[in-house]
Image (cartoon, rainbow, N blue to C red):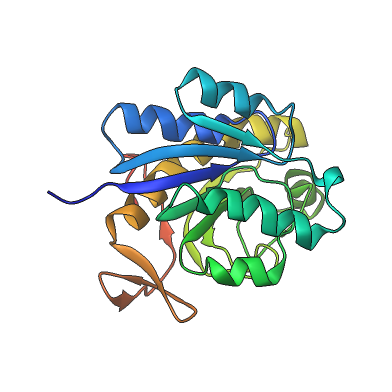
Amino acid sequence: MTARHRVVVFASGRGSNFAALIEAQRRGELPIDIVALLSDKPAAPALALARAAGVEAVALSPREYASREDFDRAIFARAAQFAPDLIVLAGYMRIIDPAVVERWRGRMINIHPSLLPKYPGLHTHARAIQSGDAEHGASVHFVTPELDGGPVIAQVRLPIFASDTAESLARRLLSLEHRLLVAATRLVASGEIALDDNRVVRNGKPLAATLHLGADGELG
């Protein structure tokens, strides 16, 4: 019997992507055990979701540390106590110290609400509309020291309507983000997808192109 991946999730806000992972785990769709939820916001709603799901919830406040680097070392040391095989950044809104990132290279993924490499950072929905883009989406990528710059595993796309605002676009994208994160986490946790040097490989072979989420919820 193959051991299930131990997963630690980081979130700063409401935790909707975390909730999607929990529900997929409960349905038997993910070969993982989510063992902890960590947050940099002691009042983050994600913490309450974790406790309600029976997942250990841990919050550390950056204000209690002398520097960003000190905080990052502390929160990732706390994560390491859960012996995770994989860390999933699911709405974690902090730039992580490069030295800390390097220690988790190939074992940490992030979901970002844009079609990377477009629009790293914040306000992605507004930036896509302001640029006159015809479509928008979300990406799951391996985390590297470059902000939202790690190799992309998979994406999902949706059209931008003339009537869209940043808020309406975000609402329409959210359920697709959930499906994308679940599907990408499944492939990474199963070992089908991995990071080799700075390339995404699938079953040991470099991906010819970024995977995309289909209407059936599968990546291809």
The residue furthest bottom is 197
Task: Say left or right for 119 vs 3.
Answer: right
Looking at the picture, tell me which residue is in the foreground, 197 or 182. Answer: 197
Can residue 139 be seen?
no
Q: Position of residue 65 (x, y in %)?
A: 83, 51
- Whether residue 109 appears in this view of the structure is yes
Instruction: Please tell me how many numbered marks the rendered image carries.
Output: 0
Farthest residue in the top direction? 52
The residue located at (57%, 64%) in the rendering is: 143
Which one is nearer the viewer's eye here, 163 or 13?
13
| Residue 52 sits above or below residue 111 on the image | above
Viewer-proximal residue among 122 and 198: 198
Q: Residue at x 67, y 38 (%)?
A: 161
* Left or right of 214 in this view: 157: right
Q: Which of the 4 image quadrants contains residue 180?
A: top left
Q: Where is 151 relative to 137, above or below?
A: below
Residue 181 x/y as whole percent? 46, 45
Position of residue 200 relative to residue 81, above or below, is: below
Q: Quadrant of residue 26?
A: top left
Residue 118: x and y in percent read: 68, 62
Left/right placement of residue 102 relative to residue 195 reads right
Quadrant showing the C terminus: bottom left
Residue 72, position as x, y percentages in the image: 71, 57
Q: Tell me which residue sits at (53%, 26%) in the image.
A: 50
* Observer-nearest of 146 and 64: 64
Residue drawn 35% across the image and 39% down it: 33
